[in-house]
């Protein structure tokens, strides 16, 4: 009888290709997003657009306040001894949209620990009047959804029917069905929409929070007096919700790599996988 101990046999599991997929995605998202930005910029030079890309903006501060608004601030938030007033209007520019304007007013003071300050930031309309009520973000919501749809279609088109995106070509990857076939455009588009679904939840959250006032009062003069007494605008509810959404997005994208050896939730739903080619 052969009593030689047998070495345990381990099943060979498929590779996750985590870093390959991450780098390929980064390359592709830069290329596709740059193409969309260039297209929107070219169209906006001919047609009036309000296509706002969250995060793709340029802020310039220093615009002087009208005398009437400056006097209103001085009356509602009088300076104390040792304080210095700082007033400015900031303009936020985005590709394909009109400028957004914000009032920044506050005071700075010298303390034993250095310089401290108290600030109030409020949107202003075209006539430089403070907008205290809800600031609706319909254009941003629509722009975000359209941008995600364009990105999803670009990824899907260049991944369907045996094609590959530039990033996947450079990293030697390919999307295929679990049966080894090349998925069609419909399957790939559904897969990409599911991939970008956390972004859609962020857009929905931003829209939901825009429906409520960011300040406890719609009286600008009362808000100035509250700021003078130490009140600070905080949006802890929105920040907490964004953290929750961020954790959910990380789980959606990365957790399956640990348990399913690289097949993400959207891969499983669409019966696809990413393999080396």
Image (tube, rainbow, N blue to C red):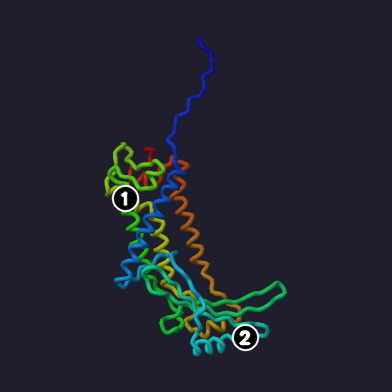
At label 1, counting other C-alpha atoms closer than 10 Å, the crowd grade (few under 14, some 14-19, many 20 or more) is many
The residue that mark 2 highlights is 79
The image quadrant of residue 49 is bottom left
In the rendered structure, the answer to whether residue 191 lies left or right of residue 256 reads left
> Spatial distance from mark 2 to mark 1, Cα to Cα?
59 Å
Residue 203 image point, x, y percent: 40, 63
**Location of residue 151 in the rendering, given as x and y in whole percent from the top left corner:** 35, 56
Q: Are marks 2 and 1 in contact (CB under 8 Å)?
A: no
Q: Is residue 24 placed above or below 44 in the rendered structure?
A: above
* Mark 2 or 1, closer to the camera: 1
Q: Nearer the viewer, residue 268 or 106?
A: 106
Q: Is residue 181 left or right of residue 261?
A: left
Q: Residues within 10 Å of mark 2 (few under 14, many from 20)?
A: some
Q: Which residue is mark 1?
A: 156
Q: Is residue 142 visible?
A: no
Residue sitting at 32 percent across and 40 percent down? Answer: 177
In what quadrant of the picture does the C terminus appear? top left
In the rendered structure, the answer to whether residue 229 lies left or right of residue 248 reads right
* Residue 54: numbered disc: none
Image quadrant assignment for residue 112: bottom right
Residue shown at the point (31%, 51%) measured from the top left? 189
Secondary structure at badge 1 equals: helix
Question: Quick check: 65 above or below 2?
Answer: below
Q: Nearer the viewer, residue 58 or 118?
A: 58
For mark 2, give the secondary structure: loop
In x, y percent, where is residue 176? 33, 41
Q: Is residue 28 above or below residue 103?
A: above
Q: Nearer the viewer, residue 61 or 204?
A: 61
């Amino acid at each position: 009888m052969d009593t030689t101990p047998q070495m345990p046999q381990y099943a060979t599991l498929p590779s996750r290709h985590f870093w390959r997929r991450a780098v390929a995605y980064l390359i592709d998202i830069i290329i596709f997003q740059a193409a969309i930005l260039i297209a929107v910029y070219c169209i906006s030079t001919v047609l009036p657009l309000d296509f706002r890309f969250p995060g793709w903006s340029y802020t310039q501060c220093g615009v002087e306040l009208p005398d009437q608004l400056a006097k209103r601030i001085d009356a509602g938030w009088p300076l104390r001894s040792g304080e210095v007033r700082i007033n400015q209007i900031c303009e936020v520019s985005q590709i394909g949209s009109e400028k957004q304007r914000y009032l920044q007013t506050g005071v700075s003071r010298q303390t034993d620990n250095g310089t401290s300050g108290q600030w109030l930031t409020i949107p202003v309309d075209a006539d430089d009047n403070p907008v205290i009520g809800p600031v609706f973000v319909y254009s941003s919501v629509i722009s975000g959804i359209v941008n995600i749809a364009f990105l999803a279609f670009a990824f899907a088109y260049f991944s369907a029917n045996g094609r590959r995106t530039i990033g996947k070509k450079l990293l030697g990857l390919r999307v295929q069905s679990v049966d080894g076939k090349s998925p069609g455009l419909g399957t790939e588009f559904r897969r990409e929409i599911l991939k970008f679904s956390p972004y859609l939840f962020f857009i929905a959250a931003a829209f939901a929070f825009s429906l409520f006032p960011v300040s406890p009062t719609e009286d600008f003069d009362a808000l100035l007096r509250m700021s003078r007494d130490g009140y600070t605008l905080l949006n802890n509810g929105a920040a907490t919700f964004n953290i929750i959404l961020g954790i959910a997005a990380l789980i959606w994208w990365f957790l399956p790599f640990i348990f399913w050896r690289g097949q993400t939730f959207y891969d499983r739903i669409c019966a696809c996988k990413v393999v080396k080619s």
